[in-house]
Amino acid sequence: MAEMVIRNEDDIVAVRTAARNLASLLEFSIVDKTRIATAVSELARNTLVHGGGGAMHIERASDSIREGIRCIFIDKGPGIPDIDRAMGSGYSTANSLGQGLPGARRLTDDFRIESTLDEGTKVEITKWKQ
């Protein structure tokens, strides 16, 4: 598992590139590479904007039948007071379109989120190779 810090806009580009490169190495389709890059970009931006920065852990994922990519985003920001509301399309606390979390969920196969007020947020996504 590799860890990449997210402190600025350049780091968002770097984590997106790392995810796309791993997807290419695993021979994901062009459509799935784009889905992965988009989800990673959205979650990295959330980590920076809402969490004040943090890190992404990226790894190859596998089970007995399939292979994929797993990315875990961790920040030590203020946390999300209402995860259900934050997962609703159009909800934003940063005057944005509010598509980051629900969009990442739609673009990936497995999505988990944990958040504790005043401690931070952890979002884990996995995209399986079809």
Image (cartoon, rainbow, N blue to C red):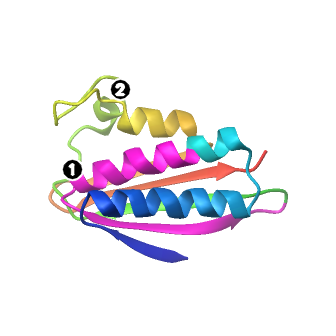
Point out the frontmost of discs 1 and 2: 1
Dot 2 alpha-carbon crowd within 10 angstroms: few under 14, some 14 to 19, many 20 or more: some
Judge whether residue 104 can be spotted in this image. yes
Q: Most extreme residue toward the right, as rendered?
A: 65
Which dot marks residue 23?
Answer: none
The residue shown at (40%, 72%) is 4
* Left or right, residue 95 beside residue 44: left
The residue shown at (47%, 69%) is 57
Q: Quadrant of the C terminus?
A: top right
Q: Amino acid at mark 2?
A: Gly
Judge whether residue 110 can be spotted in this image. no
The residue shown at (52%, 64%) is 18
* Left or right, residue 105 beside residue 92: right
Task: Name the residue beneath numbered marker 1.
Answer: 49
Task: Name the residue beneath numbered marker 2.
Answer: 88
Q: Nearer the viewer, residue 113 or 56?
A: 56
Q: Residue 110, how many percent across, how many down?
A: 59, 46
117, above or below 82, in the image: below
The residues bearing labels 1 and 2 have C-alpha atoms spaced at a distance of 18 Å
Q: Nearer the viewer, residue 7 or 78?
A: 7
Magenta stretch bounds: 36-64
Q: Amino acid at mark 1?
A: Val
Q: Nearer the viewer, residue 30 or 129?
A: 30
Q: Most extreme residue toward the top, as rendered?
A: 90
Which numbered disc flags the more N-terminal residue, 1 or 2?
1
